[in-house]
Image (cartoon, rainbow, N blue to C red):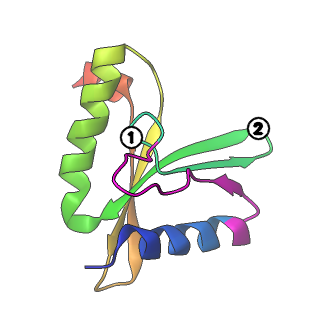
Amino acid sequence: MPKEAVIRKKVITMLTQAKWVCWYPPKVRFQQSDVFGIIDVLALRGKEKKNIQITTLANIPTRRKKILAFLKMTNVELPVEIWGWNKKTKTFKKERVTLKSVRRA
């Protein structure tokens, strides 16, 4: 399983090639470095913005649960995209998670 740094590098490469400006928090040993604990990469392009959680394909359900728990607890409407790396196909499965998507269910 690739480490988060390897997956993040792939995400940053894809986004910068598509003209997105990217930022991610620096990694500090033994400390959480995700923004709000749910965002690994922030990306901007014009008026568009993306909040991205990076993970492996197998961990998408866990990340979804973590994001939804944060959104419910804080009652914040913040769209977060989960990008799950599929090692076999060398592609990302992308999923958008919002509090509204839970309310509709």
Please determine whether, in this image, residue 37 is positioned above or below residue 94: above
Picture coordinates of residue 73 (x, y %)?
28, 17
Q: Magenta residues, as a range? A: 16-34
Q: Which quadrant, please, contains the C terminus?
A: top left
Q: Main secondary structure of the magenta part?
A: loop
Q: Please tell me how crowded label 1 is: few (under 14), some (14-19), or many (20+) other residues with Cα within 10 Å.
A: many
Q: Residue type at mark 2?
A: Lys
Viewer-proximal residue, 97 or 76? 76
Task: Specify whether 46 is left or right of 4.
Answer: right
Q: Marks 2 and 1: in contact by CB < 8 Å?
A: no
Element class at badge 2: loop
Task: Specify whether 13 is left or right of 20.
Answer: left
Picture coordinates of residue 3 (x, y %)?
34, 74
Indicate which label's residue lies in the foreground, 1 or 2: 1
Task: Specify whether 73 is left or right of 29.
Answer: left
Element class at badge 1: loop
Please determine whether, in this image, residue 47 is positioned above or below residue 63: above
Residue in the image at 44% along x and 45% along y: 34
Picture coordinates of residue 27 (x, y %)?
48, 57
Q: Residue type at mark 1?
A: Ile
- Nearest to N terminus: mark 1 or mark 2: 1
Viewer-proximal residue, 50 or 1? 1
Tell me the CA gap for discs 1 and 2. Answer: 22 Å
Q: Quadrant of residue 67?
A: top left
- Asked if residue 30 lies in the magenta stretch, the reply is yes
Q: Please tell me how crowded label 2 is: few (under 14), some (14-19), or many (20+) other residues with Cα within 10 Å.
A: few
Q: Which residue is mark 2?
A: 47
Task: Specify whether 63 is left or right of 21.
Answer: left
Residue in the image at 26% along x and 66% along y: 57
Residue in the image at 29% along x and 19% along y: 72
Residue 38's tag is 1
